Image (cartoon, coloured by chain):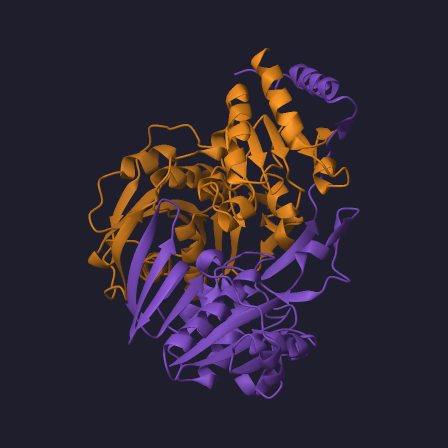
Chain colours: A orange, B purple
Amino acid sequence: MAELLVFSEKDDLAFELVSKGKEFSSVFNMKLSAALLGKKIDAKADEYFAYGADRVYIAENPALADFNAESFAEALYQIGQPNDVKILLLPSTKRGKELGPRVAQKLGAGCVTDATSVEVKDGNLLVSRYTLGGNTVAVEMIKTPHKVITVMPKTFELGAKEAKQGEIVKVNLNLKSPRTRIVERQEKVGEKVNLEDAEVLVCIGRGLEKKEDLGIIEQLSKALGAEVGCTKSLCTDYQWLSEDRLVGLSGKKTGPRLVISIGISGQIQYTVGIRDARITVAINKDNQAPIFAMSDYGIVGNLYDIIPLLTERLKNL
Amino acid sequence: MNIVVCLKQIPDLVYIRVKDRKPILEGAPLIFGEMDRNALEEAVRIKEKVEGTKVIAVAMGGAKLKEGIKGVLANGADEAVLLTDPLFANSDTAGTAKALAKAIEKIGGYDLILCGEGSTDNYSGQVGPRLADLLNLPQITYVRKLEINGNKIRAVRNMEESFEVVEAEMPALVAVANEINQPRLALLKDILKAGRKPVKELKTADLGLSGDEVGVKGSVREIISNLAPEQARKQVVFEGDLKDVVENLVNALTKEGVLGR
């Protein structure tokens, strides 16, 4: 029986993939399995079964002590090949995204990374992903018998847990010692922000003249109960805000009920990150800025005049 | 030491227009991807530090590639290998990696392969890892800092939760992040010199590849559609006295039920 295999170095993301994988494996009449790879793995298999896995592979191997794409790709290949794994689902985290293409190459598989939706249509898997810098969404079909898909986190909903028994398969892998060694991990400094879950967002772009002016943005966000996000130039070029606050193609894809974009022209690299917002507002001095076409409500004017007025008004609601 | 830099020409995204949800690429000039240019810059910086380093640019593309590659040579690459056979046209990531691997094997004697962590247009990030696998090399991706010491690489990777310091021995493939450097602008003397640098063109046959293995025929995926997402926004713009404008906005947002905690 062919198999659909799920792997994620993060269990919560694996559970999302298993939850949706249940649907695919039943349509294609496949076994649903998951791989646990590491040096010493705690018995988490029961939770994988509860979300719907039929089988869990446990591979303990010193080469898998730390994540490295080369060994992990080889491990998934050695599990996938003898067990007729036809579909491999990985999360589109940085690790998942560097792992997927490498396993795909070994399996002779087509691969789609950063999938924003995966659907079954006429017996085929149709995978969507942003392309052309976020201007368009390509719907792709993988033609090879083996398929590898890395899926953006939170694309699939977590299913309900059920009481279910499954099969645990311990596998002995033949892995060389890794050729890359992790010698140090430097924690990223700065507070942890979670823009993906924010209900209200205030995003700021190059219209802000200097770092000190972030104060008025913070006051507005406080009045709104919002998180602050920004465009690429503010965090990468000027480094006024941490990378955690980057919204857009190379940053966070957010889905708040309200986002206010201030001093942002509206390049696609940014707007792709606010596409799922319920209500979008733009404040920009250039009435020709593309951001207004992407907005439900807009104000044309100087942000330095508007923001303090808006903040005061919101405080008095 | 020999460094191979992989580059791809892409349409300049600033010039892409969308009409009836379809992307219009005509008229958009071709440029090299942002992170491809970072990879080139990093190779040239290594060359400036490590004596005897040669930087070889490898690129696949259409008729405009021969013109475009001059900028790469002006920016410090010593020579270029171009895969311009029309049979390569519209190769997907699997086909591109296959062609690059064959070309790099033909060049031979490489120590380091540098590429961007993704192309600026599609950002699929597949070519680097696929190429590393085809050439049986360790891969180090998302690199924001790179040091070469003899045969050793020390790289700082930008991961979600931390910066990861990784060591490996060459040969290896390194995929760089945008923040690793700020690519230089070529000086006039470099532009003049670029014209004299060797450029070699390779066809599928030179690489022992058939037309079925690359291009559209060799593609492992089919694009069913490629359209701009439907986006219906109200586009109400408030104008006039700023106090009124702010009042109008707050009223509208209150009606939408998006204010309050």
**Above or below — where is A12 with respect to B63?**
above
Q: Viewer-proximal residue, A82 or A177?
A: A177
In this orientation, does residue A82 appear? no
Residue B25 picture location, percent across and down: 74, 59
- The image quarter containing residue B84 is bottom right
Q: Nearer the viewer, residue B221 or A228?
A: A228
Residue A146 pos. (x, y %): 48, 58
Whether A151 is drawn above or below A277: the answer is below
Q: Is residue B236 visible?
A: yes
Q: Nearer the viewer, residue B7 or B150?
A: B150
How many labels were placed on the picture? Answer: 0
Q: Nearer the viewer, residue A286 or B221?
A: A286
Name the image quarter holding residue A285: top right
- In the rendered image, residue B214, in percent from the top left (x then y), is placed at 59, 73
Farthest top residue? A317
- Residue A173 lies, with reference to residue B208, above or below; the image says above
The x and y percentages for residue B55 are 47, 79
> The C terminus of chain A lies in which quarter of the figure?
top right
The reply, left or right, for residue A208 in relation to residue B162 is right
Q: Is residue B35 above or below residue A24?
A: below
In this rendering, would B83 be left or right of B240? Answer: left
Q: On the image, which quarter does residue A68 sit in? A: bottom left
Residue at 62% over, 77% down: B188
Determine the residue positioned at 60% across, 30% down.
Answer: A259
